[in-house]
Image (tube, rainbow, N blue to C red):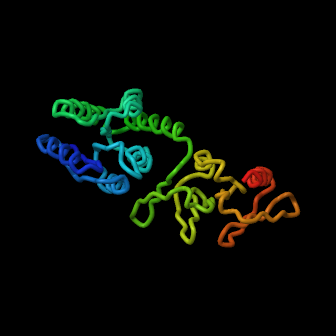
Amino acid sequence: MKIRALIVDDEPLAREKLRTLLRHELDIDLVGECGDGASAVETILRLEPELVFLDVQMPEIDGFDVIEAIGPYHVPAVVFVTTSDAHALRAFEVHALDYLQKPFDREGFAAVLGRARSELRRDGAGDGVRRKIQALLAELRAERRWLVRIVVKERGRVFFLRIEEVDWIEAAGNYLNLHAGSERHLVRETMHSLEQRLDPGRFLRVHRSAIVNVDRIIELRPGLHGDYRVVLRGGIELTSSRGYSERLRKLVDEK
């Protein structure tokens, strides 16, 4: 059976080089190419390739963002393509993930492709690959510290919402509603998980079911029981429960 492969790189010449090399591999079926991270997420989820050659350094949405957006249960076997980035190379080596370092030659490409074939035969891009990539993402999250973009999948499309655009976040069962101006986006995430990834200097939980962007607060109205009415730009009013009110007041006082 042929291996379904996808190329993701923002440089046309890099895509052409990979395409030319893959053309001579009889067991590879090149199912597509992407020139940016957003289209890569959509294409991987739609075509479900078994092997992806993924450029790390892409503008706006890089290769790591693409992997995080896809999620652990949809990650195929990945060969990361990178320039001489010492930090990225160290991370791949630590987590036993394969990579092509630009500029690469036919021999280097053949060696990497051979290892990818062996990985697919042995694991089929299963638990072994997922564990390696999850460990890499955990390390990257710790270094990046706070979330910058969040992936939104709705109505057949995938896009990235900058977290600074979010006014407030509302719990909705196993999902969250992200309120950004007049728009509302539903994402599959828990309040606790997202709260851990948000900058506490910008976002604060005011209720077990609500997180607010502190920059959107225009007024705090004291209640009778140590709580607050939190008024946001646009007239949205939320209730801060007593357990969260002190943190809210201190943070706003510091602004």
Name the image quarter holding residue 28. top left
Judge whether 34 appears above or below 67 on screen: below
Name the image quarter holding residue 134. top left
Residue 151 is situated, as x and y percent measured from the top left of the image, at 47, 55
Is residue 120 visible in this depiction of the protein? yes
Residue 198 is situated, as x and y percent measured from the top left of the image, at 60, 49
Name the image quarter holding residue 20. top left
Is residue 212 visible in this depiction of the protein? no
172 left or right of 43 in image:
right
Judge whether 74 appears above or below 174 on screen: above
Residue at 72% of width from left, 56% of height from top? 206
Residue 24 is situated, as x and y percent measured from the top left of the image, at 11, 41
Name the foreground residue: 93 vs 219. Answer: 219
Residue that lies at the very extreme toward the front in this rendered image? 255
208 left or right of 59 in image:
right
Residue 178 is situated, as x and y percent measured from the top left of the image, at 57, 61
Residue at 35% of width from left, 54% of height from top? 45
45 left or right of 190 in image:
left
